[in-house]
Image (cartoon, rainbow, N blue to C red):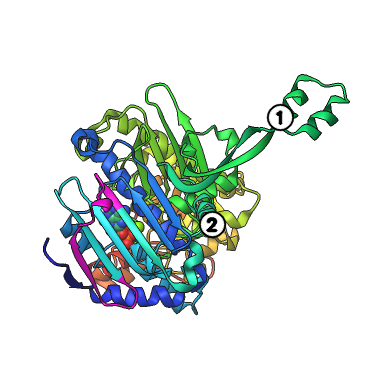
Amino acid sequence: PPPAEKFEYQAEVSRLMDLIVNSLYSNKEVFLRELISNASDALDKLRYLSVTDPDLSKDAADLDIRIYADKENGIITLTDSGIGMTRQELVDCLGTIAQSGTAKFMKALKDSKDAGGDNNLIGQFGVGFYSAFLVADRVIVSTKSPNSDKQYVWEGEANSSSFTIQEETDPQSLIPRGTRITLHLKRDDKNFADPERIQKLVKNYSQFVSFPIYTWQEKGYTKEVDVDDDPTETKKDDQDDQDDQTEKKKKTKKVVERYWDWELTNETQPIWLRNTKEVTTEEYNEFYRKAFNEYLDPLASSHFTTEGEVEFRSILYVPPVSPMGKDDVVNQKTKNIRLYVKRVFISDDFDGELFPRYLSFVKGVVDSHDLPLNVSREILQESRIVRIMKKRLVRKAFDMILGISLSENREDYEKFWDNFGKHLKLGCIEDRENHKRIAPLLRFFSSQSENDMISLDEYVENMKPEQKAIYYIASDSITSAKNAPFLEKILEKELEVLYLVEPIDEVAIQSLKSYKEKDFVDISKEDLDLGDKNEEKEAAVKKEFGQTCDWIKKRLGDKVASVQISNRLSSSPCVLVSGKFGWSANMERLMKAQSA
Ligand code: ADP
Ligand code: MG
């Protein structure tokens, strides 16, 4: 066979490996979780592809992960029967850093460095394949893809900027398909190669992996051996009344016979298939953290089954924080929903098919009974089943969010709103059909509540008996909203006014149009009717000041559309307002900002 070929890592990989080794030392054991998660991904890929191409899995039917710990030599071997890698994939995947887990790690590392550095926190993140070098000074990856005739061996060492690839030559190491990773542990980390320790780590880190994980364990069974040629024992026993069992005992003794074998170490029943009554909150949270590689618990979760027209099971979660911080682009694509069909992982790459984009922050798993296993993007987009699923998922998501808002702990919803309020406002604009579900979840500051946001329900409850509309003013801050002259008369009447201070607020409210049959009314527009019109008085005032108005209009010319007498001020002499059908001043500001 051709000799081993040498490759240099992409520069970022070398840097990453330095970082991993130097900042994760307190959390080394994550290496096992990372390697198992890669094995599980590889098995997922194989299972998915062999739905349409059964030949792919013909050479080895069992989809599993096997971990062998050689205590004496300090070696751990982890084998999966997944999709494996071709030679080119080895170069691409294990030499560069385009992968999700590692990218996320780099970001977390940077964030936590910016925040003063917390190594423990970093340890919670996925660091991917390279975490093998946390414990190993030599890593060997022998892998066989069904798309390649040959099996290849990747080999790398800690503190080296290069790796090698060559064909597998050892006949003992040939596998029909999949990947075998061999870790030669560092001197100080050899104690990881302990079957009991490995078993504990698997139970702790990988209990939600849906493929069986076997570990090589020492076992024992008790065997009875004859001892009836022992005369003293027989004699002693003969003195008592005997039942059948002791009769037997006196002739045999129990011996424990030791042997080694593969032992199933994880629970392979997916959590979403379990009975909702039997799963604890801690288990849901743990599944969330493990399935989505998160380190904080979710704000809320919802596990449900739908039956009838379409059948599926799902667990949905509201994350505790927005992944990109509060400034994230609301309408972005995520990989937050993992779709399974009859337990087979299909895809997590969706663009509005299962959730509208504005709800893309919701995470979860969905397992459908009705979709075909070889479901394609086109099928997803056109399927009636998917449309029904989407409808139900969205409702459940809103129920879950409503649940947070009703929680005793007010802070939970404040946290939610802080992170995802913008998403819901976008929902007002994009999803007319769900206005009824979104509106009660909205929160705004108001003239009577400048520090704590209120809901529209709270506003409506606080309305004056004669009040017909919900008043709002859009502005760029609470302070400028408060000082708007339009407010004077309204505040005098002790009517509450919502302060819309986020750019998106006004459009959202205008999309809603009304809440509980009360129209939203912009107090900065002309014609504001506070229900106190006194026609006679108005006519008199108009008569008196009509000419003054004409004169001002003449002086200002095109700068204003008209000059009118108003009853909405109490102490300011005049105010600039927007026309009834024109843009509000705030909207104009927005439009200007966008076209700039
Ligand atoms: P991530 O899992 O986030 O993609 P990793 O660093 O863990 O990042 O893995 C890098 C890539 O190497 C994977 O995306 C996959 O393509 C490949 N890989 C790693 N382990 C295996 C494996 N056991 N079988 C097949 N491919 C693997
Ligand atoms: Mg990975």
The residue that disc 2 covers is: 197
Quadrant housing residue 434: top left
How many numbered badges does the structure rendering display? 2
Quadrant housing residue 387: top left
Give the SS element for disc 1. Answer: loop
Give the SS element for disc 2. Answer: helix
Image quadrant containing the C terminus:
bottom left
Q: CA distance from mark 2 to mark 1?
A: 41 Å
- Left or right of 366 in this view: 409: right
Mark toward the start of the polypeptide (2 vs 1): 2
Task: Looking at the picture, tell me which residue is in the foreground, 397 or 542.
Answer: 397
Verify whether residue 176 appears in magenta: yes
Q: Is residue 163 visible?
A: yes
Q: Residue at x 31, y 33 (%)?
A: 386
**Image coords of residue 545 (percent x, y):** 41, 65
- Left or right of 72 in this view: 176: left
Verify whether residue 515 appears in magenta: no
Task: Looking at the picture, tell me which residue is in the foreground, 30 or 109.
Answer: 30
**Image coords of residue 530 (percent x, y):** 51, 51
Task: Looking at the picture, tell me which residue is in the foreground, 532 or 63.
Answer: 63
Residue 142 numbered tag: none
Q: Is mark 2 within 8 Å of ligand 1?
A: no
Please state which amino acid type lies under the numbered disc 1.
Answer: Asp
Task: Looking at the picture, tell me which residue is in the foreground, 272 or 40.
Answer: 40
